Image (spheres, rainbow, N blue to C red):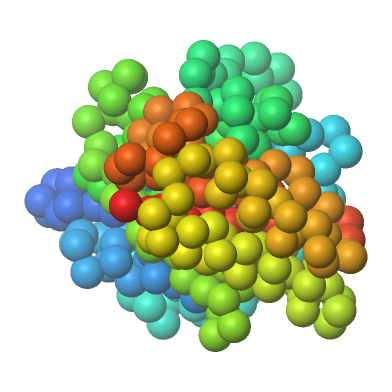
Amino acid sequence: MQIVKNIEELRSIIKWWRGEGHSIGLVPTMGYLHDGHKSLIEKAVSENDRVVVSDFVNPTQFGVNEDLSSYPRDIDRDAAICEAVGADVVFHPDPEEMYFPNHCTFVDMDRLTKGLCGKTRPTHFRGVCTVVSKLFNIVTPDRAYFGQKDAQQLAVIRRMVRDMNFGITIVGCPIVREADGLAMSSRNTYLNPKEREAALVLHKSLVLGEGMVHAGQKDAKKVKNAIRENIEKEPLAQVDYVEIVDVENLEPIDTIEGPFLAAVAVYIGKTRLIDNLKGE
Ligand code: AMP
């Protein structure tokens, strides 16, 4: 396995692979890999001849007061995980390699990015769409792998690929959780032991909401309120949003009649965590 920092070097590896007739999978990440990332890489390895894992803390998807500088990083550990799982290349460019000093071209989207996380992170998805487009152009994968953990990101990427005719298959992968239900996230490392305990309230509250739907509750507002009230019982938690939306277009729904996505963002202390649950 190789760690590649340079775009042209990666392009020549891709060209070589294509010459050999290999299919290529891409797993975009911001590094500090955990079992959630690992599940994406494993799936990519099982479905493609060659796999590139990008490991890049993308500055353009962080807002000015967000955690770009403190975001955890450990490329040596990440590379060992990728190698063990069977990836072929870890693409780990410096920010200057990815963005020219006068970079001024962005990929953005009118819908899907305004609600949920887009409300408090108005430039986030522009950064995500831009960096993922760049990675798609550099790697030209057959398939790219994204986690359902970031449900809005997955829906946005699917739409971008469709609208911009990227011709890449987007593979969504299920949320990997800790044994107690907390969705794995690189940001969980920010939590102290009390916050770690408090963070369980996200998944527990989503499960409570799902239980209401299974018991026949169709009124999305009632389910949303119950989820919110349960989260608010936890003193260390502060709700950013609780929403029940359409799985594809992410528009809020009033009546739960078919598939739905219940999504939450919650501050636990200073750490903003997201979680979601897809229901039928
Ligand atoms: P990140 O490094 O946080 O940008 O995540 C890179 C990719 O891994 C994204 O597609 C995420 O949705 C996915 N991912 C992160 N956490 C999890 C998880 N707990 N389960 C499944 N996929 C995840």
Q: Where in the figure is residue 77, as x and y percent of width and height?
A: 61, 77
Q: Is residue 70 visible?
A: no
| Residue extending farthest front | 216
Image point (65%, 30%), residue name: 118
Image point (18%, 46%), residue name: 18
Q: Where in the figure is residue 104, as x and y percent of width and height?
A: 64, 14
Q: Is residue 226 visible?
A: yes
Q: Is residue 71 left or right of residue 90?
A: right
Residue 200 position (above or below residue 241): below
Along the line of sight, which residue is nearer the eye, 274 or 202? 202
Residue 200 position (above or below residue 163): below
Along the line of sight, which residue is nearer the eye, 245 or 133? 245
Q: Where in the figure is residue 63, as x and y percent of width and height?
A: 78, 34
Q: Where in the figure is residue 129, as x and y percent of width and height?
A: 51, 30
Image point (55%, 85%), residue name: 179
Image point (47%, 71%), residue name: 176
Q: Quadrant of the N terminus?
A: bottom left
Corner quadrant of residue 147:
bottom left
Along the line of sight, which residue is nearer the eye, 3 or 191? 191
| Residue extending farthest bottom | 179
Q: Is residue 160 left or right of residue 54?
A: left
Residue 116 position (above or below residue 280): above
Along the line of sight, which residue is nearer the eye, 175 or 165? 175
How many numbered circles does the render carry? 0
